[in-house]
Image: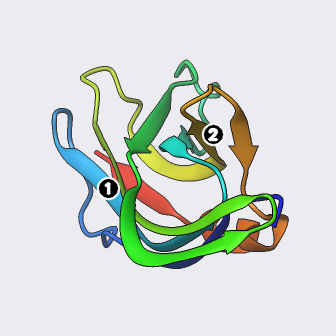
Amino acid sequence: MKELREERTREIPLGPGFVSRDVVGIEMGSLRHRNDLREVFAVFCADGAGNGGYPSRDITLRGRPQRMSLRRRHSSGTSGLSRVTLSAVVPDDAVPGEYRCRRLEAETHAGERVPFDPVTEAAWRGWRFRVL
């Protein structure tokens, strides 16, 4: 297992939207990994940002993996199962509009960036929220 695999995610519903200083978040249910993960982050970009006079502005949701009880030994190390809640405060200068996830990565305690399994991209590319 080279990449991370996100298996079950629960989005916070889009609802009417968020305003500055609101907390937006996504709960990643089951995250299988081999590495000692320090942090998972998802970068969200406003649809159409950079057009119509609005500068491009990303909002990055971050979270620390919380180990779940399942652990197995593999020849390359310990395999783990974690739960992660990603969140961020909507900044005061956030561009109004719908934000979509454009990148999902993790970082190990050693500072190595770890990609998610490409099979999971269809799921996390659908993550979105609205800023009013």
- Quarter of the image for residue 80 reads bottom right
- The figure's colour scheme reads rainbow
Residue at the image point whose x is 48% and y is 60% from the top? 128
Q: Which residue is mark 1?
A: 25
Viewer-nearest residue: 100 or 108 = 108
Residue at the image point whose x is 56% and y is 46% from the top? 36
Which part of the image, by quadrant, shows the C terminus?
A: top left
Instruction: Give the numbered dot on residue 130.
Output: none
Which part of the image, by quadrant, shows the N terminus?
A: bottom right
Residue at the image point whose x is 74% and y is 65% from the top? 121
On the picture, is 103 further left or further right than 130? right
Instruction: Give the numbered dot on residue 48.
Output: 2
Number of labels in the image equals 2
Eyeballing the image, is 43 above or below 91? Answer: below
Query: Callout 1 environment at 10 Å: few (<14), some (14 to 19), or many (20+)?
Result: many
Residue at the image point whose x is 53% and y is 45% from the top? 37
Q: Position of residue 95 (x, y in %)?
A: 41, 31
* Res 78 visible: yes
Q: CA distance from mark 1 to mark 2?
A: 22 Å
On the picture, is 18 further left or further right than 79? left
In the rendered structure, which amino acid carries the disc numbered 2?
Gly
Eyeballing the image, is 122 above or below 125? Answer: below
* Res 27 visible: no
Q: Residue furthest left?
A: 21
Q: Position of residue 61 (x, y in %)?
A: 42, 42
